[in-house]
Amino acid sequence: MMLSSFPLNNSCLADTGPASDGTLTSVLARSAQLFPDRPAVWARGETRTFDEFWGAAGTLAAALIDAGVEPNDRVALLCSRTITAYTAIAAALRAATTYVPLNPRYPLERNRSILTASGASALIIDRKCAALFEHLLEAPPPSLRVVLAPEPDTRRPVANTLFLDSKDLDRSATKRAQWPSPAAEDFAYLLFTSGSTGAPKGVPITHGNVTSYLAGISNVAPVSPEDRLIQLVDLTFDLSAHDMFMAWTNGASIVSVPENATPLAPRFVQEQQATMWLSVPSAIGIAHQAGLLGPATLPSLRCSLFCGEAFPTALAQTWARAAPNSVIHNLYGPTEATIAISYFTYQPGDASTVLPIGQAFEGQGMALFDELGQPVAPGAVGEVHLAGSQLTRGYWRQPKLDEDKFLTIDGTRWYRTGDLGRWSESDGFHYLGRIDHQIKIRGYRVELLEIEGALRTATGRDLVAVIPWPQAVDGVADGVVGFIVGEPLDPGIIRKRLETCLPDYMLPHSLLFLEALPLNSNGKIDARALAESPALHALQSRGRHEPTDPA
Amino acid sequence: MNVLSRLQETARSVFENEHIVLGRESTAADIAEWDSVSHISLVLAVESEFGMRFGTAEIGSLENVGDFVDLIERRMTNAA
């Protein structure tokens, strides 16, 4: 029995008029025509109208093309949430290329490995990231042919280096008679998420995937030109694609929270009179703890979306009190299914402890299968499988992983999420945790196996283990702790080594040394026994931020 | 006590670490306890200590502790 919103269809934007070729590029061009004087983006005190924004994107796109960047090339971005970043994304789409966001907060090695794995032919760096740029390009990957850098005095690490603030671009800004036209099946962006093999894995998303998502979410949370969508997640997180493309499709504006002020986002909503919110649910807890979510403190919000991790009902209640004019939707979906694929609308008085993930968007597929690939009965637990026009074609250059994660059942191509779920007649699908070693920390997907791989490299020890601690609830954790077998090593040195390859949210907050790892009856590492180990509880009683001593 | 010293005392209180030493060039990366969650606590504690409220754009533009000190001093001057 398939529990889904079938039959599948090829969703595409219904109201894009003459531009409805299923690409983001034509959608953006259409908005620039229809809403030239409306604001498209606000970031760090600067505003650009659609006309200015699309014009600047054209200038940048022309420079890329003139420098030899070709359609379907990857264009990497090392940018904070600045006007330059948003312009670069629009430029990449206008040049019919695929944008690949790097993250200024990632360690150098992680950005370098993403830049290399993507095979990007161009890299755009904004002024905020200028200091990181020289280190990143000490040994530029062979694919990189063009760099657009902020400072005219920056050295030229590749021969074709242009400068964003110079006349270099103006020379390329001559009107182009012909622009390349991307197709719906071309990749719009390529994101890298935590990978269980020890390296980030790439997920390429097509224009058609995104326009299908936009059609689905528009039925749930429509946007009008008057809306102001707050943008508070990193560009490496696919929720950012919702903010940008929902706004720009509908003539609305994104208002971008500066990175340093992200935890103060509710205050930013007040300042900017933002009308729409999208974040991970844990952002509510952080803001509430800081006293930023008093009753009716966010009256301008009319729609709030939460995605990326389990959504406790208590947090929804807190948000409903702070934003009394806002509808609240819980969205669900992995990067592989383009931002989100299902939704549940919160109602006051909901009795569940965690909000359901509800039902799939119209035209998309969602079902539960057991380990033998058989549909499970209503009420039984199974692995959540997804299908439809939002699914990626597969991982970036990892065919073996594709074989494992994508399968065809009765002629339909399904993606195995690794999430456990249950279905009920009353409110659809419920998320019940993971079947593997993946957890969520502040909404980020974290493969414990990737951290263990880094810990092995950093310590030179084979026997290591990483567990969420404090223990994960519904797959959501505050952080992780690492165990290492053998004589104690200097935790400070290990941490420094880990910082070179793992983002901050993946760094173990404590390291403990054991004589041996506990094993269960199957001979596997017993994570439960580790979580109950006296050493860990001693650490907890001392406060988890204290330096770690050998156990 | 100058602004930097008061800022340091506030940070020690928020991060519950009496050994924290802040200089003008210090950033969150230099203080183990200074993560995105405690950042909000620090900003709110500084607002309380100095009796002022910062805009998110002001907070977003801070690159280091020196910028924070300058912002506070600017506000104090304007209020005087």
Image (tube, grey):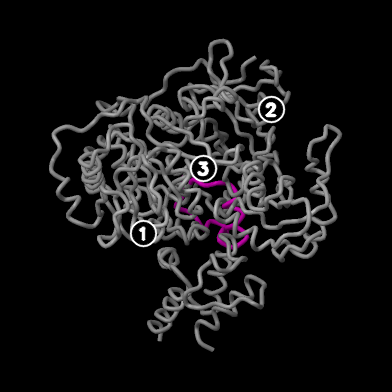
| Mark whose residue sits in front, 1 or 3 | 1
Let me know if marks 3 and 2 both belong to one chain: yes
Q: Which residue is mark 1?
A: A130
Q: CA distance from mark 1 to mark 2?
A: 48 Å
Q: Which residue is mark 3?
A: A305
| Mark whose residue sits in front, 3 or 2 | 2
Identify which residue is drawn at 57% across, 56% down: A499
Q: Which residues are magenta?
A: A278-302
Q: Amino acid at mark 2?
A: Arg
- Residue A181 coordinates in the image, percent (x, y): 25, 29
Q: Amino acid at mark 3?
A: Leu
- Residue A50 coordinates in the image, percent (x, y): 26, 45
Q: Amino acid at mark 1?
A: Ala
- Residue A263 coordinates in the image, percent (x, y): 53, 58
Q: Which residue is mark 2?
A: A422
Say which of A206 and A14 sits in front. Answer: A206
The answer to which image quadrant residue B16 occupies is: bottom right
Q: Is residue A181 left or right of residue A44?
A: left
Classify 10 Å Cα crowding around label 2: few (below 14), some (14-19), many (20 and above): many
Label whose residue precedes the other's in the sequence (1 or 3): 1
What is the magenta segment's predominant secondary structure?
Answer: loop
Q: CA distance from mark 3 to mark 2?
A: 22 Å
Label whose residue precedes the other's in the sequence (1 or 2): 1
Quick check: A188 above or below A411? below
Are discs 3 and 2 less than 8 Å apart at CB? no
